[in-house]
Amino acid sequence: MTQNLADTSRPAADATAHEAGAGADRGWWRDAVIYQVYPRSFADSNGDGMGDLPGIRGRLPYLRDLGVDAVWLSPFYASPQADAGYDVADYRAVDPMFGTLLDADGLIRDAHALGLRIIVDLVPNHSSDQHEWFQRALREGPASPLRDRYHFRPGKGGNGELPPNDWESIFGGPAWTRTENPDGTPGDWYLHLFAPEQPDFNWDSPAVANEFRSILRFWLDMGVDGFRIDVAHGLVKAPGLPDLGGADQLKLLGNDVMPFFDQDGVHEIYRGWRKILDEYPGQRIGVAEAWTPTVQRTANYVRPDELHQAFNFQYLGTSWDAAELRAVIDLSLDSMRPVDAPTTWVLSNHDVTRHATRFANPPGLGTQIRTPGDRALGLRRARAATLLMLALPGSAYVYQGEELGLPDVTDLPDEVRQDPSFFRQAGQDGYRDGCRVPIPWSGTEAPYGFGPTAGGPSWLPQPAEWAALSVEAQTGDPTSTLELYRSALAVRKARPDLGAGTGVEWLDAPEGTLAFRRGSFVCTVNTTGTPVRIPAPGRPLLTSAGADPETVDGQAVLAADSTDWWAV
């Protein structure tokens, strides 16, 4: 199934020509702004309604001009697409819907020529049930040695009719599916913490560990600059796969160490991977998607001999509230400082409701919301939250389309939804499609430049009102969200006070507001719904409110739900 690439002998060092420049010596990732591309929803080059690698390649100049440092690509591997590519059948092949390995190679080369780095998704917790290993394990029956590479177990009950333990799938229902033996009789069960089409690897198997070391080297030799590691907290399961002892297990996630998540054994895996990354020139990195009970446990993944970054999900889930934001900022910085790792900041991604919609709704509803809320309020807060995020020390992640101020599409018809958890009961919310709708580029008619022809298809329908949110519509409008992002990223690059460092100097500020200094820079944030007066910190640099704060007799008026940057 693996496609062949004509130039696989290219030395890895060739891919590092783009590394020269400021920040290379101290670690480019420490203050990088990284843009997440969800390939099926970014740009469609051939008009089939599905985004692809050539489409991304053609839009790279837009990302360079936006001002980001690196691009993270969600999975584009060969896959049956049971979970939008997070069910991988071949880790060394590109799915035909996205292109070929030559397309991937060209994308990487073009990105480097533009000064952009490329991070690819890696899915080591599970494969597709169509992976060659799993298919052989089924065909060969209980005696197959390949069954050691997954979690096959006999069932409980008189005839093995009950699952081996009480674990529940994140997508709903049991985390086990029973197989059928080659002779047609009921067989063993296999573990899948997500969809049944995603059997979990058994990382106690040396073959699994060896395979992923080889996969790492394959893509590093292709020139990628790092890996975002999906379900990084899930690879190792507790010995004996013990029962949890209750239902509604999803409510426990994020509150405690689970027998299938955040087990200490994962860290030995990442210490081995770090050695491989360090063998390659150009500062290749590993980024953990690790949902852990505390920021302190997240820090375990980025100790000096492990990975380089870990997503800060505690920050993502924080309400638009000054006191809560200050608390999580302090906690995040304090937790990463002892391991000398940069803190990461993220507001949206492909698994959660876009923050323009989260902030449009009352607090406390979580990160997956089905109601549009007050869209004007949500956008105002989203713009302010972005300037706050980009003023903090560390690395920031931007999810495609947030620079356009896109809201979640909360009214998608059931018949067009494709999130696998939507079709299973009592699992993850199932409404992730709303943040995955293809983004608008130009024109007044769907698919708004996503594909090559007006009126062409898109794999999820786009709202009519998105014509006014397209890249074309917002470019050149100084009040637009796109121009706000462009300006903010330009200021961030021009001022060494931003991004670098490990702490902030908090300043006195009225209730409901934040103010902090970073060298010759001050950031003020008003999370209240009314204007607030403060002593003017200096000269206005940038505001989320569309107009610089009014200043009278040394007093600045911070607009409701706004963030301002100041030079001092």
Image (cartoon, rainbow, N blue to C red):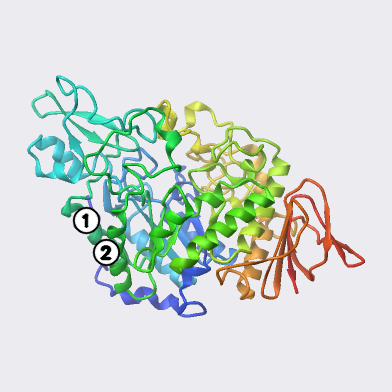
Picture quadrant where residue 339 is located: bottom left
Does the residue at mark 1 contact the one at mark 2 (Cβ under 8 Å)?
yes
Q: Is residue 73 visible?
A: no
Viewer-closest of 56 and 239 = 239
The single residue placed furthest to the top in the displayed view is 158
* Residue placed under numbered mark 1 in the picture: 209
- Check residue 272 in the rendering and tell me which mark sits there, or answer none: 2
Amino acid of disc 2: Gly
Q: Can residue 225 be seen in this snapshot?
A: yes
> How far apart are the alpha carbons under marks 1 and 2?
10 Å
Q: Position of residue 142 (x, y in %)?
A: 10, 35
Residue 92 in the image, given as x and y percentages of width and height: 27, 55
Question: Which residue extends farthest right?
Answer: 553
**Considering only order in the chain, which callout, 2 or 1, is on the residue closer to the N terminus?**
1
Q: Nearer the viewer, residue 151 or 339?
A: 339
Considering the numbered disc 2 on the image, is that residue within a helix, a strand or a loop?
A: helix
Badge 2, how many Cα within 10 Å: few under 14, some, many 20+?
some
| Residue type at tag 1 | Ala
Image quarter for residue 220?
Answer: bottom left
